[in-house]
Image (spheres, rainbow, N blue to C red):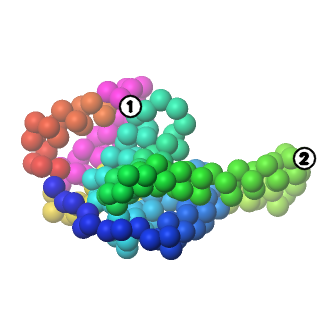
C-alpha cells in the first residue's frame, strides 16, 4: 500500500489549500464532482498530501454516508490532516476544505439566484444554461474515469474497462441500487478476482 511521505503543514500551506478550494468552488458548475481530476492533480499529484487510495476512499465514503454529497470534501481535508500528523490537523483540514468549497458558491448563489429566476426567459440566460450542459457532462465523465482507474493504467488491465463498462450499463439501464453495485465491487476486489485492482 502506498503511503504519503511525512510532511508538516505550515500556515502558507493551509492558506494555499484554502485558496485552491475557494477557486474550486467558483469553478464547480454542476457540483464539485466535475472537479475531481483537478483536486486529484493538486492533492495527490502536485502536493502529495493524499494517496490515490485515500482520495478515492474519501469520495466513496462521502457518497455512502447519509447526508449531503459534498461530505467527501471534508473527508479529503480530514485525511490530509491525518497524514500531517498533528493533533488538530484533521479537524482543521476538514474545516478548511469544506468552508473553502462552500463559501464562494453559496455567496454567489445568494446574490444571483433571484436575478436569474426573474430573467430565466432571456436568451442569454437560456444560452448559458444550455452551453454549460456539455461542459458539466464532460467534467463528470473525466471524474468517473479518474475514480474508476484508481490511479492505475487501464491499458494494461482490461478488467478495469470491463468492470467500468458493466457498472455503467447497469446504472444506466436498470434500477439496481448503487449500494448493491458497491458491495459487489467490494466482494470482487476482496476476493482477488480482479487481480489486485
Q: What kind of secondary structure does the magenta stretch mostly adopt?
A: helix
Residue at the right extreme? 118
Residue found at x 16% / y 55%: 1
**174 relative to 109, above or below:** above
Residue shown at 13%/45% (left/top)?
194
Q: Is residue 94 left or right of residue 196?
A: right
Between 43 and 56, the one lying in front of the other is: 43
Residue extent of the magenta highlight: 158-180
Residue 153 spot, x, y in % from top left = 22, 63
For label 1, the residue is 178
Q: Earlier in the sequence, mark 2 or mark 1?
A: 2
In the image, residue 26 sits, relative to residue 69, either above or below, namely below
**Residue occupying the point 54% across, 56% down:** 96
Instruction: Write down the residue under mark 2.
Output: 118
- Residue 63, by quadrant, is top left
Is residue 167 shown in magenta?
Answer: yes
Per the model, the C-alpha gap separating discs 2 and 1 is 37 Å
43 to the left or right of 137 = left
**Percent x, y for residue 60?**
37, 42
**Residue 74 against residue 65 in the figure, above or below:** below
Q: Secondary structure at mark 1?
A: helix
Amino acid at each position: 500500500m502506498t503511503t504519503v511521505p511525512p510532511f508538516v503543514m505550515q500556515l502558507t500551506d493551509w492558506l494555499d489549500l484554502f485558496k485552491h478550494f475557494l477557486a474550486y468552488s467558483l469553478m464547480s458548475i454542476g457540483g464539485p464532482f466535475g472537479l475531481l481530476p483537478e483536486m486529484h492533480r493538486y492533492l495527490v499529484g502536485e502536493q502529495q498530501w493524499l494517496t490515490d487510495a485515500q482520495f478515492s476512499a474519501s469520495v466513496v465514503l462521502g457518497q455512502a454516508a447519509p447526508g449531503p454529497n459534498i461530505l467527501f470534501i471534508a473527508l479529503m481535508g480530514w485525511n490530509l490532516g491525518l497524514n500531517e500528523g498533528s493533533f488538530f490537523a484533521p479537524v482543521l483540514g476538514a474545516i478548511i476544505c469544506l468552508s473553502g468549497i462552500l463559501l464562494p458558491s453559496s455567496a454567489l448563489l445568494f446574490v444571483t439566484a433571484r436575478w436569474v429566476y426573474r430573467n430565466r426567459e432571456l436568451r442569454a440566460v437560456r444560452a448559458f444554461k444550455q452551453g454549460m450542459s456539455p461542459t458539466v457532462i464532460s467534467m463528470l465523465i473525466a471524474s468517473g474515469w479518474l475514480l474508476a482507474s484508481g490511479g492505475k493504467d487501464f491499458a494494461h488491465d482490461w478488467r478495469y474497462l470491463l468492470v467500468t463498462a458493466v457498472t455503467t450499463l447497469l446504472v444506466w439501464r436498470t434500477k439496481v441500487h448503487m449500494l448493491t453495485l458497491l458491495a459487489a465491487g467490494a466482494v470482487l476486489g476482496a476476493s482477488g478476482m480482479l487481480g489486485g485492482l
